[in-house]
Image (cartoon, rainbow, N blue to C red):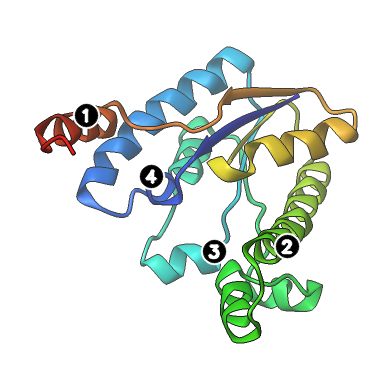
Amino acid sequence: MVIVVGTSHPVQMATEVLNAEAGEELMAFLENLCRTHEIRAVAEEMSADALAETGCLDSIPMRLAHSLRVEHRFCDPDRSERARLGIRQENDIRRQAFLSGWSESEISSRILAEHLKREQYWLNQLLALNQWPVLFICGANHVASFRSILEQENLTVCVAVEDWTSNDTVKRDARESDSRPSP
């Protein structure tokens, strides 16, 4: 079984003061899932390169795995692996689109094709990890498509939450929208 949690990468990495608080909430939420589902490994859409680029030493899922003494796996290809596999970054596609005059539908189609390559890579990483049940954390925009890939491999999938958000963030966003003048 694969338990999937979608969230934002800044929360996943707890990169800012607000996100550090959200990171603690995410850690508690994930820990509860691990205990409930007797998780044997924690994997995530993340790479050591991505952490280094943001100045982070670890991620919330990585800390969780270490605290629970279960295996942890970064499943996203690093820069050199992406180059080897021909996986392009979304920003590179948008840059080329700007220069080439592509339509939004063409841009979306190309981005989805690159996401599919990455998600297939994640699947291969989970299969190589071979620790079940596994908790997998990814960007919220990947939850539905990755679920589909997992199910095509006849893996049982439980989406715990499609887009986990900190309660503090939700409350803050509501307060900010309440204080804005009506249009």
The residue tagged 2 is 114
* Mark sitting earlier along the chain (4/2): 4
CB of mark 3 within 8 Å of CB of mark 4? no
Kindly report which numbered mark, 1 or 3, lies closer to the viewer in this rendering. Answer: 1
Q: Circle 1 sits on which residue?
A: 174
Q: Nearer the viewer, mark 1 or mark 4?
A: 1
- The quarter holding residue 92 reads bottom right
Question: Of the residues tagged 2 and 3, which is closer to the observer?
Answer: 2
Say which element carries label 1. helix
Q: Which residue is nearer to you in this view: 51 or 62? A: 51
Of the numbered discs in the image, which one, if any, rests on residue 48?
A: 3
Above/below status of 139 relative to 47: above
Mark 1 or 3 closer to N-term?
3
Query: Could you give the CA–CA distance between mark 1 and mark 2, rounded to whole angstroms?
Result: 34 Å
Residue 18 vertical placement versus 83 (above, below): above
Three-letter amino acid code at the position of disc 3: Ala
Q: Where is residue 55 in the image (x, y as percent from the top left)?
A: 36, 67
Q: Nearer the viewer, residue 99 or 173?
A: 99
Q: Which of the pair 16/152 is nearer the observer?
A: 152
